[in-house]
Structures are given as C-alpha cells and as structure tokens.
Image: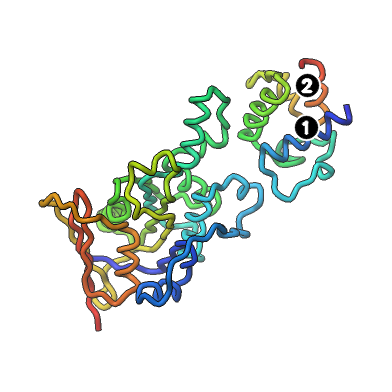
Amino acid sequence: MKFGIEKCVAWYGNIRTTEDWQLWAKGDLNYSPEDDLPPLKQIPAMQRRRLSPFAKLSLHCILESLGDNASNIPCVFSSRHGDLHKTAKLIEDVATKNDLSPTHFGLSVHNAVAGLYSIFANNKQPMTAISAGEDSLMMAIVDAYAKLESQYLDKILVVYTDQIVPEQYSQYVSNEEQTLSVAFILTKYQPDTGIQLTFEKQTEHSDEKLTFQPLDFLRFFHGEYKEFDIQSKRYQWRISRRLF
Amino acid sequence: MNELITEVKQLIIETLELEDIEPADISDEEPLFIDGLGLDSIDALELGVAIKKAYNVKIDGDSEDSKKHFYSVKSLCQFIEQNK
C-alpha cells in the first residue's frame, strides 16, 4: 500500500518537536523521561479536568497535527493497552469492593479519547478505535489506508498512544514499551514524498529481541532511511520511500 | 451547618477536580448544575458516590426529590443533615 504522511506530531519524554525528532533519529539527542504533560490551554477547564495523562498526550498530538482541520476529518485511534492506568484503578476498586467513579468508568472505554476529541472539536466524522497488540500503530495505518481508498477520502487522521503499563502488568509486556503518543495525517500517495508499506505473516519464530514499533516507525520517518524492517511476533513489516 | 457547607464545597472541588476553584467561589444558594457552577450529569453521579462515601447518605439517582437535593450546596447540606 502507498500513501503520504503529513503533520506528524509525537510526544515522547523530552522529544516533542520535529527538530527534536530529527536530532533523535540521527542520534544527536538522547531520550529522557519527563513527567510534565501538555497544558492544552485551548480546552476549557471544565472539559480539561477530566483528561487523564493518556488523554492529554493524545489530544495534544491530535490538535497540533490537525491545526485548523480539527473539525472535519475521519480518524483512526489506536492503542495496545488503552488507558490502562485508569482501567487498573477501576479493577482495583472492584476487587476491594469500593464504589467505582462514574467518570472514570465512562472514560475507560477504548474509544474514550476519540469521544473527548469529537466533543471538543465538534468533529462528527467516522472514528474507529483499534487495538492490535504490538502491531497497534501499524494496523491503524492499514485500517486508515483501507478507509482512505475505499471511501475515496483525501485524508484521514491516525493516532497512537500508549503508556508504560502499571507495575502489576509489567511482567507481561516487553521492557521496550514506552510512554509515547503520535498523530499524523494519512494522505493520497505522492511519488516524491510518498511511503510504501508492505507486511506479511511472520514465518520464523525468532527469539530476537522485539523492538517498540512506534519508535521504529518514527526513526524511519524522521531519519534518512530508504527502507526499514520491523519485526513482530505476528508480522514482518517493511516501510520504504524514495530518497533524493 | 456552616462547617458542613465548607466541607461539602471542598468535597465538590476535590471529587470533580475543579482546578482553579476555591470554596469561596462556590455560592451557597446558586444552582450547582448547568447555569450556576456548570456541572453536568456525570458530575451528579460522581458527587452522589462521594457523598455516600463521606456521609453514608444515599441519594436516589432518578427521583424528582434528588433533583431538589442537588440544586445547591445549601440544599445538599440540608439533605445530608437530615439523613446522616
């Protein structure tokens, strides 16, 4: 499949601007975790108070990526774990027989961020929220591409967010997973700037250490790679583009 | 009663994560919902849970009476006083 990517905005610790990402991809800027969150002053305080860190990271990337296009674009949201810190707290409350917070319960569904964004931006275009294990971002691209081509769209927003999982879950996931949010606009293919993506089923069961796909993707996007292979347990992905 | 009023205002601020609002900013008698403080139906549920937890007072979710109890900080405090 062939497509273009525009307005890629990603938040990963101290790496936040396009310049940061380009320096990072070259190896000239090192990642360091940061606890501060995007201020999102454009969102009214009464709406902002319900935003979890997960939602704040996502909405920052979405709104920065879309700029003036925020109210009229179909979207694909993706996350492997969703807002797991919120869900884990709810499960804990169930286990300890505490009353659940209705607000947290209502915002713990996988498409909660899509809903919050839709309300804030008054965007009534179709939106989906997907989860596909470690392939969540790449599958979001596949889903977005399918919608772009089958519905004759000019553009569609792709969003991916995950956080380092709560401690009680960390034994089940790879240490490579990080807190990261990324949003970009998938567009029709242009030969000069376009990207090609292929994938096939993983054939060999390799014990090779798996990487964190969203970071691989961003390394390819901001770096000077002609092509990049990403391995997961289920798929072999290859992203490539023309370089001049 | 005055003590309870301040306490309930504090509970509202903490439970509903009202950033930048002090107890003094909340009127005793103005409506909590829509026009006054601007709370919504999810806040009503959240506040119901918090009041049950703090004062062991259960507010029936659907009745006309609970709309009256939830009208303002003052009506809420009167209800808590009568039922705890």
Q: Residue at x 66, y 51 (%)?
A: A45
User: Which color scheme is applied?
Assistant: rainbow
Say whether residue A178 is left or right of residue A4. right
Q: Residue furthest bottom?
A: A244
Which chain hosts label 2?
A: B
Total tally of numbered discs in the picture: 2
The kind of residue on which mark 2 rests is Ile
Image quadrant in which you'd find residue A191: bottom left
Q: Name the residue under label 2.
A: B80
User: Could you classify mark 2 by the number of other residues whose Cα lies within 10 Å: few (under 14), some (14-19), or many (20 or more)?
Assistant: many
Q: Residue B8 carries which label?
A: 1
Q: Residue furthest left?
A: A203
The kind of residue on which mark 1 rests is Val
Q: How far apart are marks 1 and 2 (CA)?
A: 10 Å
Q: Mark 2: which secondary structure? A: helix
Callout 1 touching callout 2 (CB < 8 Å) = yes
Measured as percent of width and height from the top left, residue B62 is found at 63, 20
